[in-house]
Image: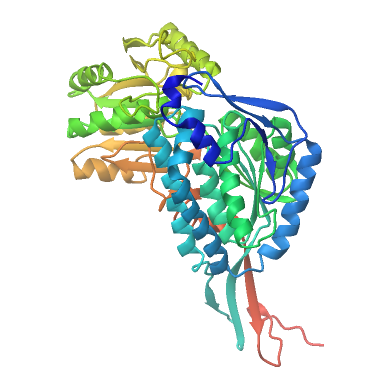
Amino acid sequence: MSKKVKDFGIEKTLKNLGIKDENKGTSTGGKYFASGKTIESYSPVDGNLIAKVKTSGESDYEKVLEAAQNAFKEFRLIPAPKRGEIVRQLGQKLRQYKDDLGKLVSYEMGKSLQEGLGEVQEMIDICDFAVGVSRQLHGYTMHSERPGHRMYEQYHPLGIVGIITAFNFPVAVWSWNTALAWICGNVTIWKPSEKTPLCAIACQNIMNEVLKENNLPEGISSVLVADHEIGQKLVDDKRVALISFTGSTRVGRMVSANVAQRFGKSILELGGNNAIIITQDADINMSIIGAVFGAVGTAGQRCTSTRRLIIHESVYEEVKNRLVKAYGQLKIGNPLDESNHVGPLIDTDAVNLYQEAIKKGKKEGAKFIVEGEVLKGKGYESGCYVKPCIAEVKNSYEIVQHETFAPILYLIKYKTLEEAIAIQNDVPQGLSSAIMTQNLREAELFLSQAGSDCGIANVNIGTSGAEIGGAFGGEKETGGGRESGSDVWKYYMRRQTNTINYTTNLPLAQGIKFDL
């Protein structure tokens, strides 16, 4: 480990989180085991080996499923507010481990330290939210058309919830799902990205403390660090009632089909190709801040990253020039150093995709006003650092229609707001969108039925970042389904309609007569 990284206390962080040189990647809450291959987690920050993880094999998978099934039988009977208390305790643990877990997220994934800490804060926030929801898992009471009858709806837990997450948010997305799944009475099995296994093990270690302190059965929370074959088993398993999948549209399409084939439920959070519309009535200062953070935050590796800026022709040159100036001030380097704005991509495969996208863009006619490059030399030894770039394009370019998980920002000029909205919607994805304007009519049109077709539509803030209180998710090839706040808890429960007859007669609905 380099001296620079040692200065940031990574070794102590790993120790505090229970991460060893050799780790077992399967835990059912009380037991750790693994019989699969060994994978190595390297940091994109400096290219150094952090630790090794023994992954899950098929026998481990069956042990996890059995533990989950047994735990569900007990956990579902615990009153929801009591389950909320368990989630509250997890939130307290996360506060205790926030600095260490945030630092690990930054070092293993490559996002800035502030973003790593922010991701853990999201975990804390969803725990707080879920605790409140645990006392509000309400149904509805309806009037029956039959005398002496009462009708109502109630919600019951589904059973086992499988959670498959991506590398870019290695801890937060797990918590969005688990906190709600648990207060609803479900148990969870987490299959994290193989690119960030240590973050998952750290989270499970923290939750294991809560389970042990409350004498709860193993299997309420399980983690499977494994390859795609084990992930496929989870997707295809009829014992798993719900699959929450975060990842590419290509893989999500297969997950959706397989889960639907067995009549399971799925929540899909897939690709984003997010745009900010900057109108002639926009606050340009706000627009530049929102655009730059949205485009370069997490090195462009967010599903909500800003990919396209759709700029009114009257302010196009001003916005373009100010963006070029802002990009010239970006500091790229070790994300644990808070003076840096941009960290590395996750690995060299991501770097290759970045280079390929630039090459394709130029071939189609993209004009790069800030050139991209792979950075080399001192501080960039991992080979994962790239320069954020900007290109003037047409929305119809094939490369613009796809999501590249890298800091590449496309500029597009427009004349009318209707044209801008049409451009924004003219991509296969539909996750996040934003408009920068001080004109009320423009804002309302953007939010209307004739406006953005995305699951998230913002006014005077960027596309990146979302509060826990709102439902998170998108439309079209982004997949559908929602995570996090609002009434998303209903996704993790099955709905049941109940009718009670408290008379001595049996009248039938719609006045049907059936006398014997």
Q: Is residue 239 visible?
A: yes
| Total tally of numbered discs in the picture | 0
Determine the residue positioned at 32% across, 26% down: 309
Can I make out residue 272 in this image?
Answer: no
Left or right, residue 225 beside residue 132? right
Q: Nearer the viewer, residue 341 or 503?
A: 341
Provide residue 47's location: percent of width, then percent of height.
Answer: 52, 18
Q: Nearer the viewer, residue 215 or 70?
A: 215
Left or right, residue 184 beside residue 115: right
Give the residue displayed 75% in from the left and 50% down from the top: 239
Tell me which residue sits at (38%, 47%) in the image: 467
Of residues 317 and 102, the one drawn nearer to the viewer in this rendering = 102
User: In which quadrant of the rendered view does residue 321 lie?
Assistant: top left
Q: Position of residue 92 (x, y in %)?
A: 47, 55
Q: Is residue 388 left or right of residue 70?
A: left
Which color scheme is applied? rainbow
Q: Is residue 343 above or below residue 473?
A: above
Where does residue 379 sit, x and y in percent of width and height? Answer: 41, 14
Taking depth in this image into account, of 32 and 490 the one nearest to the observer is: 32
Residue 358: image quadrant is top left
Quadrant where the C terminus sits is bottom right
Give the x, y percent position of residue 298: 41, 29
* Vertical order, 377 against 159 (above or below): above
**Residue farthest bottom in this picture:** 504
